[in-house]
Amino acid sequence: MVTDSTAALTLEQAAEWGITVVPLDVAAGDRRFRDGVDLGPADLLDLVGSGTRVTTSQPAPAAFAEVYQALADQGVREVVSVHLSGALSGTVRAAGIAAQLAPLPVHVVDSHSAGLGLGFAARTAARTEGDGATVAAEAARVGHSTSAWFVVDSLDHLRRGGRISAAAAALGTVLGLRPILTLRDGRIDVLERVRTRPAARDRLVHLAFEEAARRGRPVRVAVHHLGNAEVAEALAERLRDVDGAVEIRVAEVGAVLGGHLGAGALAVVVVDA
């Protein structure tokens, strides 16, 4: 089982679940880092706080080819490789290129998701028995079920990184209102605007309850943050009674997602269990 560093899995979780994580690349000034390997959330906040511009890029196909070869050498017969939404990054495309030349069958899955929407999909796949096609289908089912909403202090990071259009960024910041963004079909868009941070947090909670009730089936819930642990934990506590929630996790986003969301970001994710 292979995923990438935007899945918001800790090294311990990945090891426990038998998931190999391929890091995305982060550039800060003239320095380059690997997300989650030699650059973590705290390091990112230091860089951003110092005024350093941070950019990100997908791994080269060679990075995936190396992982697939290593798994083949270990005796693995088939690989499922599930990744960040192709609408947000070329990561899944790079994995697909490497898969074509791999010495074993590789099923590449576009999760249409990010963060623990992707992480839950990878973990579910790692726990699913069956052939590669069956496991890949289960990863796609969970990833494609993702609903996510988030608030950021500024849309500039998303706009500069091309993850949101200039028009959407302008719309999100009119009249000084705080935008609530959503991940739909693997793309980021402005959902609505509210006036204050507390109102934005209230709205995130309401949207999660509303979505879970609409589904009427077991779900998993995640709360993401960047440098905002206490607020994230408080938000998670308010989500304990979400209809059908079988799990609630709090996770800080890594340097790649954090580089696009910015300090103070909060997100709530709901996926099918």
Image: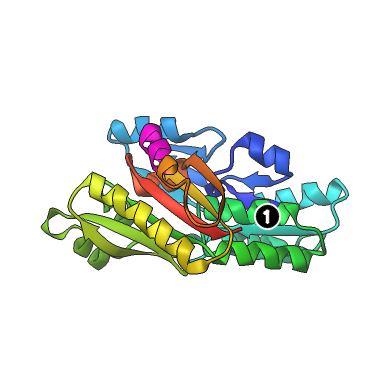
Dot 1, crowdedness within 10 Å: few (<14), some or many (≥20)? Answer: many
Badge 1 marks a residue whose secondary structure is helix
| Residue type highlighted by circle 1 | Thr
Q: Is residue 247 magenta?
A: no
Confirm whether residue 33 shows in the render: yes
Name the residue furthest right: 75
In the image, 76: left or right of 16? right
Q: How is the image coloured?
A: rainbow
* Left or right: 116 as drawn, with respect to 42: right
Q: Could you say which is closer to the camera, residue 218 or residue 251?
A: 218
**62, 68: nearer the viewer:** 68
Q: Residue at x 27, y 53 (%)?
A: 155
Q: Position of residue 175 (x, y in %)?
A: 11, 58
Residue 193 appears left or right of 141:
left
Would you place residue 169 above or below residue 52 in this image? below
Q: Which residue is mark 1?
A: 124
Placement of the C terminus among the 4 image quadrants: bottom right
- Residue 137 lies, in percent from the top left, at 69, 68
Q: Nearer the viewer, residue 22 or 82?
A: 82
User: The magenta stretch spans which residues?
Assistant: 225-235
The residue furthest left is: 175
Judging depth in this view, the residue of 93 and 254 nearest the camera is: 254
Would residue 227 be counted in the magenta stretch? yes
Residue occupying the point 29% across, 32% down: 49
> Is any atom of residue 169 visible in this view?
no
